[in-house]
Amino acid sequence: MKIAPLPTLLVVAALPAISLVARTEAPANRAPLNFSVMTDRPLIDRSGGPQEVVVRVELTGHPRDRRARQPMNLAIVLDRSGSMSGAKLEQARQAAEMLVDRLAPDDIFSLVTYDTEVTVLVPPQPIGQRADAIRRQIRAIEPGGSTALYHGVEAGGRQLAEFFDEKRINRVLLLSDGIANVGPSSNQEIARLGQSLARQGRSVTTIGLGDDYNEDLMTALAEASDANYYHVADVEALPDVFRRELGELETVIARRLTIDIEFPDGVEPLGILGRGETIAGNRTRIAFNTLAAEQRREVFIACRVDPTVWKEATTTLARATLTCQAAEDDSDVRLTGEVAAKATDDRALAAKAQVADIAAQAEIYRNTDATRLALAKADGGDRAAAQAMIGSQIKRLEAAAASAPAPAAATLNAEADQLRQAESELGSSAGLSKEGRKQMQWNVFQRSNSKPVDRSASGTR
C-alpha cells in the first residue's frame, strides 16, 4: 500500500468570520475527492437559548477519465422464475448482453440464474474472446419455476470469490421480479447474507422489476453492502438501469471510505438524519463502500447547542476525519475538517446568516425518517395514523420549500407531491398501491444511504 506524502490544505469559506478547513495527506491535486464540513447556522442568536443546528458532511468525487477505470469482477444473478416470462426476461437478456459488450477483455464476468434451482450458467472468467459465446448463453435463458433468491445471491457471491481482488470492483447484480419463496426468504436472513458478503469485500446491487417483488428485502440486501437499489416499473427502462450502474462502477475514484465525526463538549448530537447509525457519546462513524467520479454523498447531523453558556464567542460544532483509498494508485488518503459557529446578540443577523440550502436539504433527510415511520404504520394496518403523519410532513416540506433556493425547493416540492399521492391512496378503499409503496421505499433507501435523489434512477419514468 502506498502512502501519499504530506500535506497541503483545501479551504472552504462559509462567512468571513468563519472558515472550514479540510487537510489532506495527499497533495491537493492528488486527493480524489472534495471533503467539506458545514453548518446551517454559522451565527447563533444568544437570546434563543438552547437551539438546534445542523452539521453537513459532504464528499464529492473529482472527475475521472473513464479510460482509467477500475477492473471489474461482476456476477449477474438473474431471476428466471415463471413470472419473468415474456417482455421482462427479454429485456433482462438484452440488458445483460449490453453489459457484456461494455466490459473490458480482462474484466471478470459470471452469470447465475435461478428459479426453483440455481444454475451457474457462466462460471467466472475474463471476458477475453468469450463475449460472443457468453451472449449466446444469455439468449438461451428460458423462464422456469419458483424463486430461490437467497441461494441465487449466495451462488453469485461465490462466483466473485475465485477472482476476488481488492483492486477490482467485486459486485453482484441481482435482478428479480418476485418474492423469495424457496429457501431462506425473510428480510432478516437475506440482509444477513448481504452483511456476510460485505465483510468479504463484495457488494450486491439489487434491481426490482415490476410491482410484485419484495422491496424491503431488496433494499436490505443492497444497504448491507452500500451498493445500489433500483425500482424498475417499466421493463423498457432496464437497459438504462444497467448502463447507469456500470457507468458508476467504471468511474470509482475511492474505496473503503470511513468518516469519524466528533462533537466537542457543549454540543449535543441528536441524531443522523435519515440514516441508521447511532451516536455513542460524542462520536459516530459512517462508512461508504465506494465513491464514483462526480458522485456526491452527504450526511446531516442534528445537534443541540446553548450559546448562552459558551466561554468563547466562537465554538467548534464538529470535527470530522475521512480516510479512504484512492482507486487510481491505491494510495491512502486522510482528510480532516471542522466547522464552527459564532454567538451573536443580533437576532436579525443570525437569521440572515442561515445557510438556506443546508437547512432545506436537512428537511429532505428528515422526511426520510418520517416516511419510514408512516410506512411502518401503514404496513401495521393503521392507515389513519399513516395518513396523519404524511399530512404533517407535507406541511413541513411546503414550509421549507417557501424559503429554499430554487433547486432545493424543487426537490422539496417533488417530495411533497409524492406524499400527496400516498396520502390520497391511503384514504381510498384500496389503500397504498404497490407502486406507490415501492417509490416511497426507493426514496427512503436513497437518503438512508446518503445519496441525493435523482428520480430518473428509480427507473419509474
Image (tube, helix red, strand yellow):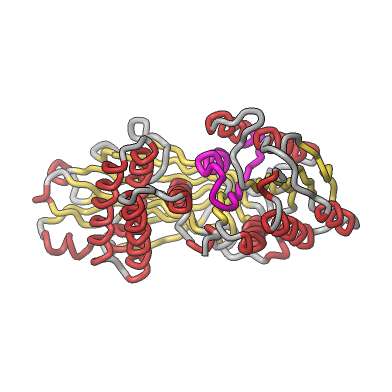
Is 96 positioned to the left or the right of 33 in the image? Answer: right
The image quadrant of residue 129 is: bottom right
Q: Position of residue 4 (x, y in %)?
A: 62, 50
Q: Position of residue 353 (x, y in %)?
A: 22, 63
Q: Position of residue 86 (x, y in %)?
A: 70, 56
Q: Is residue 305 magenta?
A: no
How many numbered marks does the figure carry?
A: 0
Is 33 positioned to the left or the right of 387 in the image? Answer: right
Q: Is residue 223 magenta?
A: yes
* Residue 376 seen in render: yes
What residue sits 69% from the left and 65% below the top?
66
The image quadrant of residue 93 is: bottom right
What residue sits 54% from the left and 42% below the top?
214
What residue sits 36% from the left and 67% below the top?
410
In the picture as drawn, the residue positioned furthest to the bottom comes out as 406
In the foreground, 171 or 150 = 150
Q: Position of residue 420 (x, y in %)?
A: 32, 58
What residue sits 59% from the left and 44% below the top?
256
In the foreground, 442 or 170 = 442
Q: Which residues are magenta?
A: 197-224
In the foreground, 158 or 78 = 78
* Residue 31 seen in render: no
Task: Give the position of the N terminus as an image quadrant.
Answer: top right
In the foreground, 189 or 71 = 189
Is 255 positioned to the left or the right of 380 in the image? Answer: right
